[in-house]
Image (tube, rainbow, N blue to C red):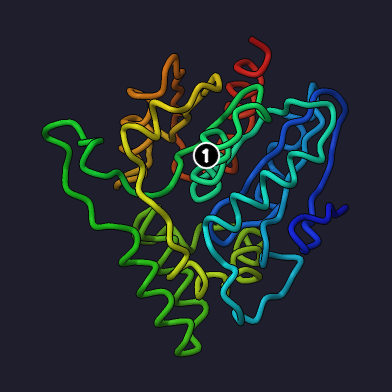
Amino acid sequence: MQTFRVNDYDMAYLEVGDGPPLVCVHGTLGDFRTWYSVLGPLSKAHRVMAVSLRHFFPEHWDAVGDDYKMAQHVADMIAFIEQVKPAPVDLMGHSRGGHIAFRVAQARPDLLRKLVLAEPGGDLDASLPVPEGTPAHPPLAARTARSVEMIRAGDIEGALQNFYEGIEGDGSWRRVPAAAKQQLRDNALTFLGQINEQRRPYTRADAQAIRTPTLLIGGAATTGSLSVMWRVLAEHIAGAETAVIPNAGHWMFEQAPLEFGEMVSRFLAE
């Protein structure tokens, strides 16, 4: 584990491999360990730099302060990437980390060579309607709010199960490996920050502003809004490529690491 000093914060990251830099950004309840399952495949041709965002493990945050904001995490990632050489870098984000990567590409395309968004999180505004006939999905924000209530009541395990099964379906929590569960537990208090992180919805203009060559990836088994959002964004990002990982859900890189690694590596090599 190493650190870069970014915006008065020591940002931890894990570095594996040699070659052009690929910076990886985890999602909700994650940290640099999120990418363990694909470090092998991805580091064959890249210097993989997996970050832990502000207030995530290895920090044990007490949920005190007002700097857990989407804008802060985006600014931190920009400051981090500015220190990575050689430039520009490839940037990959998953879920909430995909939202952060999208905003970095929007604000500082000069820092990026290619962009990979694995089921980016967030909401679509009215300028990005979903296709007709798309089933209505309850917003994940409601699940997050419920998990926050449970954490405040001392029920960490119930909060994590509620959140995870809101994405992967009822009964999925019991199938999560012990190490992955521990990572989620280590970051449980970040939920308390996320409830007021001031994340903006995606707009059509936002998507059209992305000029970095972009790959959007989804899991074939993902349900709910996360299965729709990346497809809508892909329609409005110029030249965007898409890929679907068979027999995998939202945490596709854990469930199908070889397939995920091959798709990402192929795109980055083009």
Measured as percent of width and height from the top left, residue 180 is found at: 63, 58
Question: In which image quadrant can residue 153 be found?
Answer: bottom left
Q: Residue at x 55, y 22 (%)?
A: 212
Q: Is residue 135 above or below residue 28?
A: above
* Residue found at the far left of this picture: 133
Q: Is residue 192 left or right of residue 149?
A: right
* Residue found at the far bottom of this picture: 153
User: Label 1 sits on what residue type?
Assistant: Met
Disc 1 crowd rating (10 Å Cα; few below 14, some 14-19, many 20+) is many
Q: Is residue 58 above or below residue 81?
A: below
Q: Is residue 53 left or right of residue 199?
A: right
Quarter holding the C terminus?
top right
Q: Is residue 267 above or below residue 55?
A: above
Question: In which image quadrant can residue 261 be found?
Answer: top right
Quarter holding the N terminus?
bottom right
Q: Residue at x 41, y 23 (%)?
A: 237
Give the residue at mark 1: 252
175 or 32: nearer the viewer: 32
Measured as percent of width and height from the top left, residue 124 is found at: 30, 44
Measured as percent of width and height from the top left, residue 93 is found at: 58, 40
